[in-house]
């Protein structure tokens, strides 16, 4: 029997705004059905929305979701994958209120997409995007059922007392990640427990920061691709999304 080719995936760019800032999402979906479907937001790493994030949107579309790659920095503001992008990320680390507003604007835009089920949304994120996923969960917006952080930064936003977190949280963490040492992992576990969140932390032994990126090869800085951790974390994400978006009662 011949192998079936994967379904064609439609991609498009969609402008949305936060205050006076124009942002540009990258959206992917299977066009063979006009039915609404769960939406998965993708929060980018410090380089900004780029081809790897577009690829994740397409991969998620092939799984039956509406893939919606967020644009935290703003339209046309992009860094390089192999560059130091601290100048782009720093304003959002220094002003987590701004980051939260930018994320909520992206979520609102996704909920308005004609193919998105506004009550079945999750967010995944990588590195800086992992922090974004956690910060969006910390805001507990309506319809956000799950948040997944891949080798993300973990420190809290310190925007006042943390309200109860209704979004379920999955943290996929490299145990040898110098940007999120064990003390930060334990602090996050305490934070999520005190906020009464439904949370999981999967720690991959010997894995470093950026373990999902094939080009990561700076072990002296604690940055290194790990094929096993990448494979296991993607499988864990898929199982988690199926649970919170497809099987859990509304």
Image (spheres, rainbow, N blue to C red):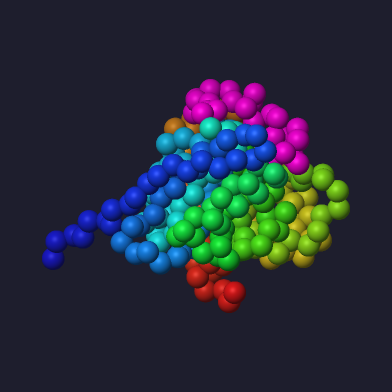
Quarter assignment of residue 48: top right
- Residue 113 seen: yes
| Name of the residue lying farthest toward the front | 20
**Picture coordinates of residue 15 (x, y %)?**
51, 41
Q: Which quadrant of the structure image shows residue 92?
A: top right
Residue occupying the point 40% across, 44% down: 12
Measuring from the top left, give residue 227's x and y in whole percent. 44, 45
At x 72% / y 54%, what residue is drawn? 139
The residue at 59%/74% (across/down) is 250
Left or right of residue 197, residue 29 in this image: left
> Is any part of residue 206 visible from this angle?
no
Q: Where is residue 40 in the image (x, y as percent from the top left)?
A: 51, 55
Quarter residue 102 falls in: top right
The answer to which of 78 and 23 lies nearer the viewer is 23
103 up-or-down from 165: above or below: above
| Magenta residue check for 92 | yes
From the top left corner, tell me how far across and down residue 130 is, in percent.
Answer: 61, 45
The N terminus - image quarter: bottom left
Q: Which residue lies furthest to the left in this view?
A: 1
Residue 238 vs 248, above or below: the answer is: above
| Segment colored magenta | 76-99
- Assess whether residue 88 is covered by the magenta stretch: yes
- Which residue lies at the image location 53% right of the left edge and 32% below the top edge? 75
């Amino acid at each position: 029997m011949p192998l079936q080719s994967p379904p064609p995936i439609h991609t498009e760019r969609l402008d949305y705004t936060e205050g006076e800032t124009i942002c540009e999402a990258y959206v992917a979906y299977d066009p063979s059905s006009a039915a609404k479907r769960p939406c998965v937001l993708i929060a980018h790493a410090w380089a900004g929305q780029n081809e790897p994030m577009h690829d994740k949107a397409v991969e998620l579309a092939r799984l039956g979701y509406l893939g919606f790659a967020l644009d935290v920095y703003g339209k046309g503001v992009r860094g390089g994958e192999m560059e130091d992008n601290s100048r782009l990320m720093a304003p959002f680390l220094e002003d987590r209120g701004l980051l939260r507003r930018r994320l909520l604007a992206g979520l609102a835009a996704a909920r308005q997409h004609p193919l998105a089920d506004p009550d079945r949304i999750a967010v995944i994120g990588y590195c800086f995007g992992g922090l974004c996923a956690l910060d969006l969960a910390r805001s507990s917006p309506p319809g956000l059922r799950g948040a997944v952080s891949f080798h993300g930064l973990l420190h809290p936003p310190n925007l006042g007392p943390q309200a109860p977190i209704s979004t379920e949280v999955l943290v996929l963490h490299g145990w040898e990640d110098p940007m999120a040492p064990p003390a930060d992992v334990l602090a996050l576990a305490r934070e999520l427990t005190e906020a009464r969140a439904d949370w999981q932390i999967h720690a991959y032994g010997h894995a470093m920061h950026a373990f999902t990126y094939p080009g990561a090869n700076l072990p002296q800085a604690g940055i290194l691709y790990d094929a096993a951790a990448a494979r296991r974390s993607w499988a864990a994400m898929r199982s988690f999304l199926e649970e919170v978006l497809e099987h859990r009662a509304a």
